[in-house]
Amino acid sequence: MTSQQSPATARRPIRELPDELISQIAAGEVVERPASVVRELVDNAMDAGAQSITLRLMGGGTRLISIEDDGGGIAPDELATALKRHATSKIGNLDELESVMTMGFRGEALAAINSVSELTLLSRMDGQPTAFALDGRTGEIRPAARAVGTTVEVKELFFSTPARRKFLKSDSTELAHCIEAVRRHALARPDVGFAIWHEGKLVEQWRVHPGAAGLEQRLADVLGEEFVAQSIAVEYNAGPLKVVGRAGLPDAARSRPDHQFAYVNGRFVRDKVVMHGARSAYEDVLHGHKQPAYALFMQIDPTLVDVNVHPTKIEVRFRDSRAVHQAVRHAIENALAAPRSQNLSDSATEAKADFDLKAPAAKILPESASWQQGGMAFERPGTSTFSAPSYKPADFVRPRVDGEQAMADLKALWNPPEPRQEAHDTDAPRWSAPAPSLNANTAASALPAPITEPTQALPEGDWPLGRAVAQLHGVYILAENKQGLVVVDMHAAHERIVYERLKNQLNTADGEGPRIASQPLLIPATFAANPTEVATAEACAEALEQLGLEISPLSAKTLAVRAVPTSLAQGDAVELARSVLAELAQHDASTVVQRAQNEILATMACHGAVRANRRLTLDEMNALLRQMEETERSDQCNHGRPTWRQMSMRDLDALFLRGR
């Protein structure tokens, strides 16, 4: 080991750094790649009041970055000052810094960019006879030709720091980052037009969209029509905070968080509070590790947010982060709460009209024929050809539920049931009288009159999820609505209904805290418990009471379930108790029980929901469909799986090549 001191540990005097080295150090924070330059220059253009911004690139931005705008411009005597460190027109004192609303304010960008590139600043103000250009290397100012506005040209980025240039990626990769930087600005400002050119070719262009509908149109232009079609509008007010935008539907979730855009007072941010609030709103509607898509625009009092946190200004700090978190969460939750099945009714008429226009005229049947098999040379049940008694429900081997309608009866294929007099009156007539036989000559005139439908809360045409017609393998419900066929996963749908009912009971309960209504068991259910379950039952007694459960120890190894939630009184009390205790064992009831409640309720709902392979009557299936239409977030189960799917007539026609 040598006794000579290494250069790294040698004593060196403390001294001030030269200005150029200071600027290059600052450039390391502000200018990471060409996209960083684009972001800073577009910020300046927008602060100058530009209505049109054009970006020209060469070599992915490494050889040339040119930003042209039609903003207010810079005075000739201020051009040289603009390239100095910490020189800005955005703020002048601490009060203005604490309430800043402009995109830029630090006064570092131009100086940092000038220190690692060849920069030229060209600008003209309104009323000036000519424009002036400033050479960033020499400081020379000369007259030039230009309309009102500013042009900033950045050539040979990182030419003075070759080591930094080695870390850049390929031209195509850097171009993609530059486009993404402009996209983030374009989403927030539909009143500004943007154009991106690369190597003399137009790559992207987003035109101006003024007015109230401008934001949605810009979202469609930048993120695609599919994003707008698979998202729902968000609008929420909470005191000084307003949240607007669009939240992607759970079905449109992505594998990567590349469609998550959050803005605070027009500034794109990557804030943990906002991202966590948005993610928590999707907790019980996303499947697996899918990532939601959203574009949220928050307006907040500038004194309540600190934007002077990071040199790139992509991070912010809120004075009341909890209020922001809750506002973002509630904004998205409220938007996702309404069942999407309601939208089917709104578009039914348009969809049917569009389908009728495109369908062959000879194949259009009257509305009254929707449940009749007209125009076919077959005899109906009850005629000489078919005999109804020959086809009895007993001929079909399947489980039966008390009060179940005889769906296997062949007559069910011809006419809907008549209104029932009593719930279990199996002797009452349930089908219309047989009609005369139909043949090709009398088909047009022999269609029977419409059958009287059972009295319901809503007319048949107002049922978004339609009317149940069958059950498939005890798992799926098949229903017919105006659009076509609806397929429902009955367990997933009922699980969501029970889950939302439990949540409502918990949130609206009175007393010391939110509690779920419970029902004492006549005979307590006992089971052998391990030490962890016994300890959890004793430590979380209050949390269990809030959840409608009463579990007490009978011995060191035995627990007794004395009460269960009213909604789950018919379920397996022991299995429910074990599941809830397992959930509580993973959470500290005194600190995170509020967050764990929904997960526990989801577990309870899963055990209380109707199981697969259970046969349902038509009435039970229709009741489930009606509950789905009224239940919030009924489009996904508690685990994020979809509960229903729509197949339109156009989809069905495509399967069978009809109309081709």
Image (spheres, helix red, strand yellow):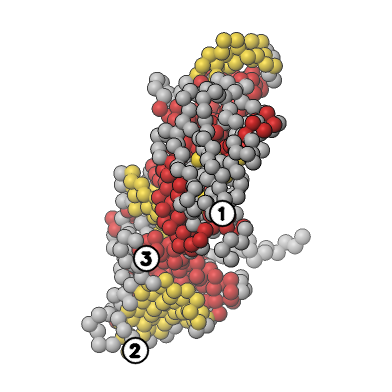
Q: Which residue lies under the disc numbered 1?
A: 440
Marks 2/3: CA–CA distance: 31 Å
Q: Amino acid at mark 2?
A: Ala
Query: Is 330 located above or below residue 497 in the figure?
Result: below
N-terminal of the pair, mark 2 or mark 3, is 2
Mark 3–mark 1 contact, CB under 8 Å? no
The residue that disc 3 covers is 190
In the image, farthest residue toward the right: 1
Nearest to viewer (mark 2 / mark 1): 1
Toward the viewer: 447 or 40?
447
Amino acid beneath label 1: Ala
Residue 101 spot, x, y in % from top left: 32, 59
Please tell me whether mark 2 sits on a helix, a strand or a loop: strand
Mark 3: which amino acid? Pro
Q: Position of residue 167 (x, y in %)?
A: 61, 70
Q: Which residue is mark 2?
A: 144
Q: How far, Cα to Cα, is label 2 from label 1?
A: 86 Å
Task: Measuring from the top left, give residue 545's x and y in whole percent.
Answer: 51, 20
Relative placement, left or right, of 87 versus 579 is: left
Question: Circle 3 sits in a helix, a strand or a loop, which is it?
Answer: loop
Of residues 26 and 379, which is closer to you in this image?
379
